Amino acid sequence: MTLGRAKKWMRLAGAACLVAVSIASPAAAAGAAQTGAVPASPAPAVPKARPMNMIFVLVDDLRYDMLGFLQRGVKTPNIDFLARNGVYFRNAVVTSSLCSPSRATILTGQSVRNHGVVDNTNSTEKGLIFFPSYLQQAGYQTAFFGKWHMGYDDDAPRPGFDHWVSFKGQGTYLPTDNLSPVQVAAGMRQTLNVDGKRVNRTGYITDELTDYAMDWLQNGRDKRRPFFLYLSHKAVHSDAVPAERHKAQYTDLKIDLPASMANTPENNAGKPLWVQNQRNSWHGVDYPSGTDRPVTEQVRDIYRTLSAVDESLGRIVAYLKKNGLERETMVVFYSDNGYLIGDHGLVDKRNAYEPSIRVPMIAYAPGKFAKGVTNDALVRNLDLAPAFLDAAGVAKPARMEGRSWLPLARGDVAAGQWNAGDLIYEYYWDWTVPQTPTTFAIERDRIKYIQYQGVWDTEEIYDLRKDPDEMHNLIDDPAYFETKRTLRAALFAQIADSNGRRAVPLTERSSSGLVYRNANGPHAADFPASWYRAPNLPGRMNDMFPDTAAKNAANAEGRSYRPSGPVAPPPPK
């Protein structure tokens, strides 16, 4: 199996989150939606057609290219079916690659700087309005099954859902995980919160959540009304644990890891120090999750764990077919973030590199969406909530930042006419896993600029048109000098929140976090050679001032530089 083969088959693939939408009776006029006690502004219904029932299945940590139709030898027949018969968005991305922040963006249609869920620890949901609340006001029945992962120790039912099945935090794959032998012998099990009642777990998490979802579809809903079902899998979150029936899969599957994984001067050239240092950490290939387990085995377990997700999807699609709902149903498959499997020496996500921010996405609605089409438009997690409301005929609330991609899926708008605008990325440093710094990035016309907050390190520019694997940092390339200035200014302008503020949040620290490294692994990386200079140079203060052509000339000639007047950055474009 080769990652390169993924590019050949991209046009067939879909995403790691499933949304099914089935057409039902006309929706009622929408009223004021609420999250908790927080009222929303009315979202008036805009009747367009009979509303669609929706099933949204979110997968966790699924890399954009880890599906059967992209990887030789990997079997995901039900996901592949959606890809062959729906619309594959091969440029789907997230605006923050971390579980809780991304999930909050999906639910609110807001960026992290506006919804405020900045990490996986215990961010507040106060004041947030989740889009299913608007669906309820439009006459929909709504149900949630699975991983919520906001408010770490709180799995209580949330506003916007008529039926609720969830667990605390990351949850576990098996009912007896994280319990002592004494506790297991005493009959203790991990639990689910089912509509506010504590219920013991009984099986493998993917199967168990699917059983609850299928029971609601078959027996728990009013079949005269439209519905929205959100199936939020724990799978394939690391460390991935497959179902017993899948543990023998892929034993002989050849796993080819990214070429950038090798710790070589060529691969490290231009990379920030934090990237080079992270390779020997909890989120690096030399010490993954504090182990010496080969990354190839971790990849095999991801594929094995994905098998149960694929079977779950098969059960859902079979139900739709059997009950005459398939042609009334939109299915969207998506992941909360991407995942690195050795790229640049890293595992996990969080950073702004392509394998971290790109996710698989398929939209399937027979008779409504195009069949077997690959769409190149940039679609973000910000755009999911507006699309779900659009499918229900509900107007997008003003607080939502994204926009509906349904015109793309229907073929009403071509990818070239989509005009997605700049992709703005943000990630905030998390003390629990402190390897990745606060990160801000902007991508425009396939050129990506990345800067970091609070660390002594280099910026990055990658021309993805020529360098899709982000191997050549162009931050000091004279040919990209004006691009650097322009993107810096555009990022600063667009990273402001809805109140015009640019703030890096501080979360309460209660421990050192996972700071350790493999004693037998590499030690700290060195600074770039160009940063070492002789003392007392005339131009030693030059880089206190904004980049200009005049300053560049002074640096080249070894002269001191002082701007003659205020130097404004280029205007954002």
Image: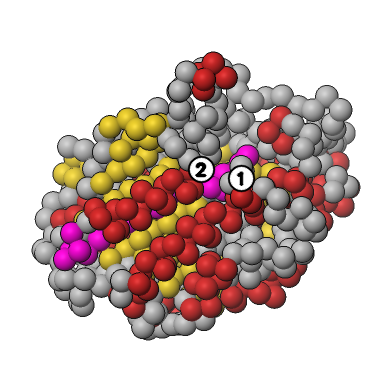
Residue closer to the observer: 232 or 343? 232
Label 2 or label 1, whichever comes before in sequence order: 2
Query: Which residue is disc 2 drawn over?
Result: 204
Which residue is rendered at x = 35% and y = 52% of the image? 213
Which label is found at residue 485? none
Labels 2 and 1 touching (C-beta < 8 A): yes
Q: Is residue 492 visible?
A: no
Amino acid type, mark 1 = Glu
Q: With respect to residue 234, does 136 lie above or below? A: below
Determine the residue positioned at 48% across, 68% down.
362
Find the distance from the CA under tag 2 to the CA under tag 1.
9 Å
Q: Residues within 10 Å of mark 1 (few under 14, many from 20)?
A: few
Instruction: Identify the image quadrant of residue 543.
Output: top right
Is 231 magenta? The answer is yes
Is residue 456 highlighted in magenta? Answer: no
Residue identifier under label 1: 244
Secondary structure, mark 1, is helix
Coordinates of residue 65 in the picture (x, y in percent): 64, 62
Relative height, residue 325 to residue 113 (above, below): below
Residue 161 location (% of width, % of height) = 25, 47
Instruction: List x then y, in percent, for residue 419.
Output: 45, 73
Q: In front: 498, or 47?
A: 47
User: Label 2 is placed on what type of residue?
Assistant: Tyr
Q: Which residues are magenta?
A: 222-239
Residue lying at 26% horizontally and 34% vertically, measured from the top left: 196
Q: Residue at x 21, y 38 (%)?
A: 36
Q: Secondary structure at mark 2?
A: loop
Residue 502 drawn above or below residue 364: above
**Main secondary structure along the magenta-highlighted residues:** loop
Indicate left or right for 556 with 442 as reference. right
Label count reads: 2
